[in-house]
Amino acid sequence: MRSMSLKPVSLVAGLLLSVWLLAVCVPAVAQTDSRALYLESIRNSIEHLESVSPQTMDNGQVRAPDPDRYEFSYNGAVSLRRNFARTATEVDRAPMGYGFLENTVTEAGLNVGARTGLSFSSTVSRTNDLWGTVLNEKQVDVYGLKQSFGSGVSTSALGFTRNVTRNSPHLGLETTTRTDAFSFATGLRRSNDLKLSFTDTEIDTPGGHTESVFQASYTPKFSGGDGPLSLVRTEKLINGVSTEIEKIDLTAPFLWGGLKGVAEHHSTETFTGNLLTKLRTTHVLLPLEVIGKGVTADFLVTGSDKGAGMVETQTAKLVNPFRIAGRTYTAEETYITLHQPGLESETLMTKLCAPLAGGQAVIQRQTVDTETATGTTEQRQLSVVLPTIKVGTVSPCRRNA
């Protein structure tokens, strides 16, 4: 009787065990497949995060990330990069003379099509003592935009950059410097480039500091080559004192009778407070091959006004090389005039260079006429410079005892 009563019990227990095994194993298999698919889908993200997450080594141990250094990067339509480094360093103001220097760099970029790009970068440099107190911190944030358009020789590029720098010393005032820069460049035609730029800077110092700079340059093609033309205008306001500077540079190389000459002009005007100063230079070099081979005419005008009146010097110089009996001689004629308040002067200088005894002999005559409020004076000067001439050698003398 007892053995027959146990058979139904064992049968029921077997059925219950089979149902439990199916309930446990089937979901586990399905869950294993879903986890495998999920891990495979995020494999790329896992690989990018390996540098900042614990990793399993070959021996089964877990390697923790370096707390003093890590790097993260991602490249795609949006590029991301972040670096952190911490090093021990000597710090004079810190207790025990040591501290930590931490550098954190964050960069991001976005390309919108083939011609538009956005960028951002942030660099934070921080010095801490051994207890974590911030002794000095500097942060530089840069925002950028680049846009290109056009094609061929008329390709153009437009750019904007904003730079914000914050200095936060432990003892002292925090200062912020903001600089906005705009740039534009285009090719008007072949070998002719136009560039424009504007920079505006503001520093929140107690006295105030603002500065703006406008630059324009154009490079046309002349018969003698490229001739850059440029304009730079600067405006400053520092501690309530304004300064304006305007600089112009013009250069035009040309060909004259198959030889290269040049015409150029440079000027600078500075206005500070109520004082205006001027500097200017005009120069023309002409090759006069029609007169003789190697003949040149040089004209130079310089002027300077430092608030007491313009001081101007004009110089005209003619250089004429010629040959006689197979030897080359050079004749130079220079005329100089000086104009300044209360004084006028004229200088005439004639110079002849001739070959002599393997060297050069120079004969120069100069006349200077000066006119002032008290009268007129005249000075004349003649100089002759001869090369060293070796007359002979002295034979040694021997005496026999």
Image: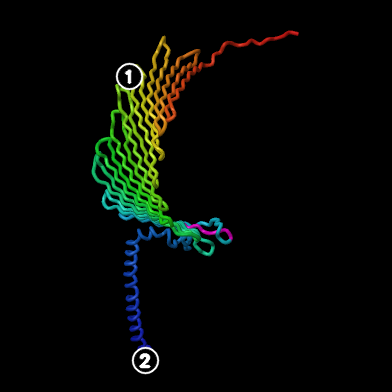
Q: Quadrant of residue 230?
A: top left
Q: Is residue 272 placed above or below 348 in the rendered structure?
A: below
Please state which of residues 101 and 16 is positioned toward the viewer in this rendering: 101
Main SS class of the magenta portion in the image: strand
Left or right position of 175 against 110? right
Please state which of residues 108 and 74 is positioned toward the viewer in this rendering: 108
Position in image of residue 31 (x %, y %) = 33, 70
* Distance from Cα at disc 2 to Cα at disc 1: 142 Å
Question: How many neighbours does mark 2 have within 10 angstroms: few (below 14), some (14-19), or many (20 or more)?
Answer: few
Q: Is residue 364 placed above or below 198 in the rendered structure?
A: above
Quarter of the picture holding the C terminus: top right
Position in image of residue 238 (x %, y %) = 41, 51
Which residue was labeled with disc 2?
A: 1
Q: Decide which of tag 2 and tag 1 comes sooner along the chain.
A: 2
**Do we see residue 83 in this rendering?**
no
Specify whether residue 346 is painted magenta.
no
Position in image of residue 274 (x %, y %) = 39, 46
Specify whether residue 100 is painted magenta.
yes
Mark 2, mark 1: which one is toward the viewer? 1
Q: Quadrant of residue 216?
A: top left
Query: Given the image, on which type of amino acid does mark 2 rest?
Result: Met
Label 2 residue SS: loop
Position in image of residue 331 (x %, y %) = 41, 17
Tag count in the figure? 2
Stretch in magenta? 96-102
Q: Identify the residue at the far bottom of this view.
A: 1
**Do we see residue 109 in this rendering?**
yes
Which residue was labeled with disc 1?
A: 289
Label 1 residue SS: loop
Please state which of residues 39 and 378 is positioned toward the viewer in this rendering: 378
